[in-house]
Image: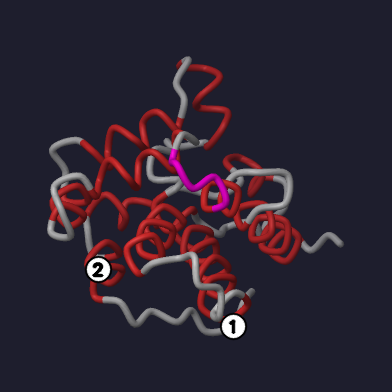
Amino acid sequence: VHGYVHVSDKLIWDLIATKEFQRLRRIHQLGTTSLTFHGAEHSRFNHSLGVYEIVRQIIDVTFAKEPQLDPEERMVALCAALLHDLGHGPFSHAFEKVFGTDHEEYTQAIIIGNTEVSEVLSRVSDDFPLKVASIIKKNYPNQTLVKLISSQIDADRMDYLLRDAYYTGVS
């Protein structure tokens, strides 16, 4: 959908390799929609990589000369973009309605819990998983980074609108 996904940071490669992220390969992006639209077999894995790529392009290309984003904040944003849907269960949002869960809360629990993802993030610093989780929780001090991933026009929406339309065959 976005062409080549550029990953040059070892931290991102290490996160992609975790069992929690790899699990997203088996979670359909559109839940049961693939029963109606036979092409809608894409996964949360594809979508998460797409959101990461959009945020990476915004930070590294569009706003490359902006002085206010330090290297750690760049990594916080990229990690949050990549991991934003970790908490999705099977059947996507339908699962949440039936079982009364919230994928964003579960995502935060995976990021800061006793998981491979948390272990990888903790290599940066002890509080790095909390920083990434705070973007998902929407209380990170730099609200611009929060809005890149969760707002009316965000990378999440940019990806799923293009991706879902492509795989369902609708405009």
Q: Residue at x 45, y 42 (%)?
A: 141
Q: Residue at x 51, y 24 (%)?
A: 96
Q: Residue at x 83, y 60 (%)?
A: 170
For the residues marked 1 and 2, what is the alpha-carbon distance in whole angstroms?
21 Å
Judged by its main secondary structure, the magenta piece is loop
Could you tell me residue 50's position as x and y percent? 54, 66
Could you tell me residue 139's position as x and y percent? 46, 34
Outermost front residue? 67
Location of residue 36 with respect to 49 vertically, above or below: above
Q: Could you tell whether 124 is left or right of 54 in the image?
A: left
Point out the image quarter for the N terminus.
bottom right
- Front residue of 58/166: it is 58
- Name the amino acid type tagged 1: Gly
Q: What colour scheme was applied to this rendering of the protein?
A: secondary structure
Q: Which residue is mark 2?
A: 11
Find out whether the residues at labels 1 and 2 contact each other: C-beta distance under 8 Å. Answer: no
SS state under label 1? loop
Q: Which mark is residue 84?
A: none
Location of residue 73 with respect to 64 vertically, above or below: above
- Name the amino acid type tagged 2: Leu
Could you tell me residue 129's position as x and y percent? 25, 46
Range of the magenta residues? Answer: 140-144
Disc 1 crowd rating (10 Å Cα; few below 14, some 14-19, many 20+) is few
Q: Which mark is residue 3?
A: 1
Point out the image quarter for the C terminus.
bottom right
Res. 86 image quadrant: top left
Depth check, mark 1 against mark 2: the one in front is 2
